[in-house]
Amino acid sequence: MESMSVKIPPEVRAAMTEISRKFGRQGGKKAARNMTPEERTARAKKASAAAARKRTAQRLAKERATKPAKRK
């Protein structure tokens, strides 16, 4: 992907940032209001599984870093 070669003026960048902040905060809440209970449950389960995978990967990486390598 090529980078943009157009410079965005600081005042436009500030306005874009403010709009992003305003609408970004309500994104999850608005999405949850528009979902059925089953969809919310599925989304929560997916997020929970992803968090568990991340925790497990971090724990395993930490264990590998602290234990000496086994010799064959």
Image: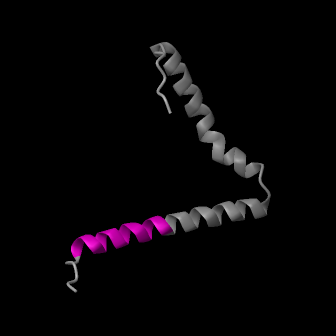
Q: Does 56 sit left or right of 50 as displayed?
A: left
Magenta segment: does it hold 59? yes
Q: Position of residue 23 (x, y in %)?
A: 63, 34
Q: Quadrant of the C terminus?
A: bottom left
Which residue is situated farthest in the front direction here?
72
Q: Position of residue 53 (x, y in %)?
A: 49, 68
Residue shown at the point (50%, 69%) measured from the top left: 52
Residue shown at the point (75%, 50%) measured from the top left: 33
Q: Position of residue 20 (x, y in %)?
A: 57, 31
**On screen, 9 above or below 31?**
above
Please name whichever residue, 67 or 17, is drawn nearer the observer in this view of the structure. Answer: 67
Q: Does 49 sit left or right of 41 as displayed?
A: left
Magenta residues (range): 53-66
Please name whichever residue, 10 or 32, is drawn nearer the observer in this view of the structure. Answer: 10
Q: To which quarter of the image does residue 15 belong?
A: top right
Which residue is situated farthest in the right direction here?
36
Magenta segment: does it hold 61? yes
Residue shown at the point (59%, 27%) measured from the top left: 19
Q: Does 19 sit left or right of 6 as displayed?
A: right
